[in-house]
Image (cartoon, rainbow, N blue to C red):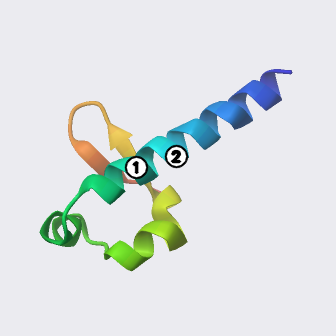
Amino acid sequence: MARFINWIAAKLRRRRDRMALLELNDEQLKDVGISRSQIDSDHSRYRMSQSHGLERHRF
């Protein structure tokens, strides 16, 4: 059951991050280092940071 809850939480985080990226204008996306077309393809590489906005995941 805990795995399922963690999976749901991860899905919700990814959705929240994608929505945050979609709110940025093209200039802000450029500052982050991505284009609008990349949001759907690899938005999971980015996450919201409590203190700094969007940060790139380190794999």
Which residue shows up at 72% across the image and 36% down it?
Answer: 7
Q: Is residue 19 above or below residue 37?
A: above
**Quarter of the image that includes the N terminus:** top right
Q: Which residue is mark 1?
A: 19
| Secondary structure at numbered mark 2 | helix
Compare residues 35 and 58 and report the one nearer the observer.
35
Compare residues 3 and 26 and report the one nearer the observer.
26
Which residue shows up at 16% across the image and 63% down it?
Answer: 28
Are discs 1 and 2 less than 8 Å apart at CB? yes
Q: Is residue 59 visible?
A: no
Q: Is residue 19 left or right of residue 5?
A: left
Which residue shows up at 26% across the image and 71% down it?
Answer: 33
Between the C-alphas of marks 1 and 2, the distance is 6 Å
Q: Is residue 38 above or below residue 2?
A: below
* Residue with the most extreme top position: 1
Q: Looking at the rendering, which quadrant does residue 57 occupy?
A: bottom left
**What is the total number of numbered labels drawn onto the structure image?**
2
Q: Looking at the rendering, which quadrant does residue 48 occupy?
A: top left
Q: Position of residue 13 (x, y in %)?
A: 52, 39
Q: Looking at the rendering, which quadrant does residue 35 occupy?
A: bottom left
| Secondary structure at numbered mark 1 | helix
Q: Position of residue 2 (x, y in %)?
A: 80, 21
The amino acid pointed to by label 1 is: Met
Numbered mark located on residue 15 in the image: 2
Crowd tier of the residue under label 2, counting other residues whose Cα lies within 10 Å: few below 14, some 14–19, many 20 or above: some
Q: Is residue 21 left or right of residue 43?
A: left
Q: Is residue 24 visible?
A: yes
The amino acid pointed to by label 2 is: Arg
Q: Position of residue 50 (x, y in %)?
A: 29, 30
Crowd tier of the residue under label 1, counting other residues whose Cα lies within 10 Å: few below 14, some 14–19, many 20 or above: few
Q: Is residue 54 left or right of residue 17?
A: left
Numbered mark located on residue 40 in the image: none
